[in-house]
Image (cartoon, helix red, strand yellow):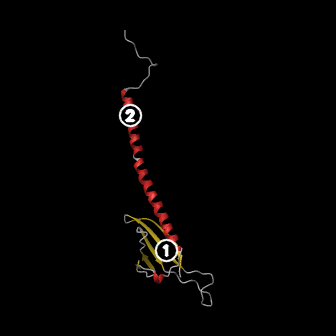
């Protein structure tokens, strides 16, 4: 005598198990592609933070002393003669551009206003592998 299946018997067929494994595999592969992207993103962020800190250190160093534009060694960066590019051997990955100070505002007697300080604008570009990573701007006192 043969037994008939009753509705109480439950289980998964081989086809159902294989289908669930295929779906699980697709989800797993999609999830695993995220990890290399996260590593790349973390490396880029770390490099950017390092170069931003280095640019800040350079800016603070240049702020610590007054600059006479005529004493700076370098070449004109653009057709605008007010910008000067300098090379600092201590920072080989930095492009340091300094812009000559603008004339301070004058009062009615044609003298500089009291308390006005002449400033040179400084633009620091941080490069890695000939690619711009970060840049910073600031001002340094003019002599």
Location of residue 106 by image quarter: bottom right
Q: Is residue 99 above or below residue 7?
A: below
Task: Identify the image quadrant of the N terminus.
Answer: top left
Q: Residues within 10 Å of mark 1 (few under 14, many from 20)?
A: many
At a point 50% along the width and 67% down the height, the residue shown is 57
Q: Which disc is residue 122 wearing?
A: 1
At a point 56% along the width and 83% down the height, the residue shown is 104
Look at the image and tell me whether residue 59 can be seen: yes
**Residue 96: x, y in percent?**
44, 73
**Residue 50: x, y in percent?**
46, 61
**Residue 12: x, y in percent?**
41, 26
SS state under label 2: helix
**Residue at the extreme bottom of the image, as rendered:** 109
- Mark 1 vs mark 2: which is more N-terminal? 2
Location of residue 42 by image quarter: bottom left
**Residue at the extreme top of the image, as rendered:** 1
Q: Which disc is residue 58 wearing?
A: none
In the image shown, does 25 or 43 lie closer to the viewer? 43
Q: Is residue 22 above or below residue 122?
A: above
At a point 47% along the width and 72% down the height, the residue shown is 123
In the image shown, does 3 or 106 lie closer to the viewer? 106
Residue hosting label 2:
21
């Amino acid at each position: 005598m043969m037994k008939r299946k009753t509705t109480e018997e439950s289980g998964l067929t081989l086809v159902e198990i294989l289908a669930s494994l295929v779906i699980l595999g697709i989800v797993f592969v999609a999830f695993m592609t995220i990890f290399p992207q996260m590593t790349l993103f973390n490396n880029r962020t770390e490099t950017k933070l390092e170069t931003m800190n280095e640019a800040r250190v350079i800016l603070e160093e240049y702020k610590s002393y007054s600059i006479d534009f005529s004493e700076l060694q370098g070449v004109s960066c653009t057709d605008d003669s007010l910008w000067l590019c300098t090379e600092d051997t201590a920072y080989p990955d930095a492009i340091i551009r300094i812009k000559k100070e603008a004339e301070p505002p004058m009062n009615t007697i044609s003298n500089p206003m009291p308390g006005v300080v002449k400033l040179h604008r400084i633009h620091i570009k941080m490069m890695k592998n000939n690619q711009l990573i970060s840049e910073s701007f600031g001002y340094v006192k003019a002599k």
